[in-house]
Image (cartoon, coloured by chain):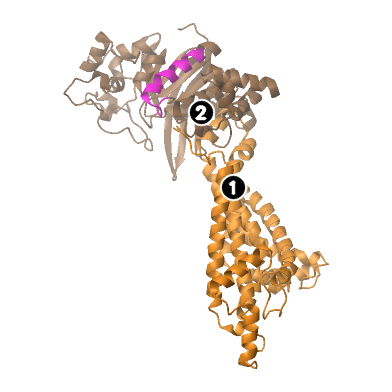
Amino acid sequence: MLKYSIKRLASSLVTLLIIITVVFVLLRQMPIEGYFDNFEKADAATINAKLEQLGLNDPIPVQLFNFLKNLLQGDLGNSTRYSVGAPIAGIIAKKAPISIKLGVLSMALSLMMGIPLGTAMARGKGKFWDKFGTMFIVFINAVPSAVYYIFIQLYGSTALGISMLFDETNYLTWILPVFSMSLGSTASYAMWLRRYMVDEMNKDYVRLARAKGIAEKKIMTSHVFRNAFVPMIQYIPTSLLYTVCGSIYVESLYSIPGMGGLLVDVIGRQDNTMVQAIVIIYSCIGIVGLLLGDLLMGVIDPRISFVKKEGAR
Amino acid sequence: MQDRETVLSVRDLNVKFSLRGRTLHAIRDVSLDLYKGESLAIVGESGSGKSVFVKTFMGLLDANGWIDSGEIVYKGHDLTKYNTERQWLSVRGKEIAMVLQDPMTSLNPLKTIGAQILEAIELHQGLTGEAAHKEMISTLVDVGITEPERRARQYPHEFSGGMRQRVVIAIAVACRPKILICDEPTTALDVTIQAQILRLIRSLKEKYELTTVYITHDLGVVANVADRIAVMYAGDIVEIGLCEEVFYQPKHPYTWALLSSLPQLGIKGEPLYSIHGTPPNLFNEVKGDAFAPRNPRALKIDFVKRPPYFEVSPTHKARTWLLDPRAPKIDPPEAVQKLSTEGVLGYE
């Protein structure tokens, strides 16, 4: 297990290094306007001086080496246009917490709604909850989220008697964005859980459990649900980590000062250093999520063995 | 045999299934007495209803099946009247336990072997903690698993097929049932393992004074383990009798055909015997003797009227018009006669 973990960690680091290199090299091909807030008015000497100061005249490998050196100290560079001269790490540190809070809450909510829904669907296959759940899943997947987000905002704020916009200090205003964000994952958790549970329910070991006299309820919880949840666990770290990125649409709808939309924003403004930093953060999140998911599976599923067996079976 | 105590008695059982809007009559008027401590084998080809039949003893029919009429009396209760889960939980495991066909899939892959046996022990023997653990280890020893302490902590995928079947048997025995049903217990196993598993079940039967019911299509298995044999065809028991009676003096043409298709009875160089045609479609009402259409020497009446049981001996009866005094004398096929004179069967 330890050996596998170390190997897996090392390969993740290599992947990350490759991503950083590619992103970094690509962004160096961008026009240099992105590093100035007054490019049109500046003369050649000023431009050159600025480029020199930023280290952009060095050969690319040297620049990359310097960037990596700074990265190790947690320095992602400074923003050039979004918020001139401000350290990027600081900008993100200010914006990420609110996205994380909302994201974690919405994920908890979708687990709280999706798991019971999926279980109810699997238990009463073809009955009310199954039909209701299927309708819900189809609706969520077929209707563009923008449509129901707006309805939730309109009717929700009237019903709760609150303002349409988000206010961090008023917890009532957290309800609607969190609820909106949770719907998509609720549908997918319910769908997958139902599917995995139905698969498990038809297996022989469930028949044997029934034949040995275990009550249906207990079979559902200690055999079927437990086994069906294992394949889902793999994806939970990833979806948890992605909450950091925030939801572009919900955040702009409720004017939430979070991470959502930040990448789009800085690409539009050609803030190269920030694009680079954010892309690297996102890929980090993806890689770490997959890594954690795999390791978690290894801990939970005894069939996954990280040791090569001699003469197995 | 006659004075033996009956533990389970089935009377005129009819089981039907609803499939795509049509009704399938899977078990047709079956009656059977199961005697205490005996070992009964139910043989028949796939789809003859043997599995469905025993499932009714435990209320384990699939959701689209139901008992249409008849009764199953166990300890004075009619099991066909059971309709709540609680009633069935008083039977399943506790009174009747089951060993399923495929050991590769009948254990939960995510629970240790020990935990799965403990589940049965805690539920049916009322033991907990240390006592339950001790019982679990001794059950593992009972079924012939070495290093039980270490093996108990392992998961099913760390066991071979034969070993897993031992675990499944351990679970069944740990329920301390009165009746053990083995649904094709050796079909999924290597031939070399089959005899071991059968021997194991037989020794546990003695140790725990079980009544065992084997379901199988392998007559070789039957010859080794059964006191009595019930031959099922198209949802009906067509012949039932002591092992020797069914093997050496079979009366029903279907039993003849079944025995003739034993590879052991084939003559070297000649094609093996096989029964022509397919079993009747149970969606339609069967008229007369269900086997008649596949029986080249069927009588006219076989197509018209369903035969009743004719008693051959107090322990042996068969549902065939051939036993009627008015019937023409038809001799069993050569292979079956050879079997009665030479008696070549079984692994042991």
Left or right: residue A173 versus residue B256 is right
Residue at 47% across, 17% down = B200
Question: Could you say which chain is coloured brown in the image?
Answer: B
Q: Nearer the viewer, residue B119 or B76?
A: B119
User: For mark 2, what is the residue?
Assistant: B56
Magenta stretch contains residue B324: no
Q: Secondary structure at mark 1?
A: helix
- Residue B65 in percent (x, y) is at 49, 36
- Give residue A260's position: percent from left, percent from top: 66, 70
Q: Amino acid at mark 1?
A: Leu
Magenta stretch secondary structure, dominant: helix
Circles 1 and 2, Cβ within 8 Å, touching? The answer is no
Asked if residue B252 can be seen in this view, the reply is yes
- Between residues A58 and A36, which one lies in front from this camera angle? A58
Please state the extent of the stretch shown in magenta in the rendering. B186-205
Q: Residue at x 22, y 23 (%)?
A: B297
Q: Is residue A105 left or right of residue B323?
A: right
Q: Quadrant of the N terminus of chain A?
A: top right
> Which residue carries the number 1 mark?
A295
In the displayed orientation, state which residue is furthest to the right.
A169
Q: Is residue A239 left or right of residue B65?
A: right
Q: Position of residue B217 (x, y in %)?
A: 37, 25
Q: Is residue B176 visible?
A: no
Q: Is residue A83 above or below residue B158?
A: below
Check the residue under mark 2 and report the chain it is in. Answer: B
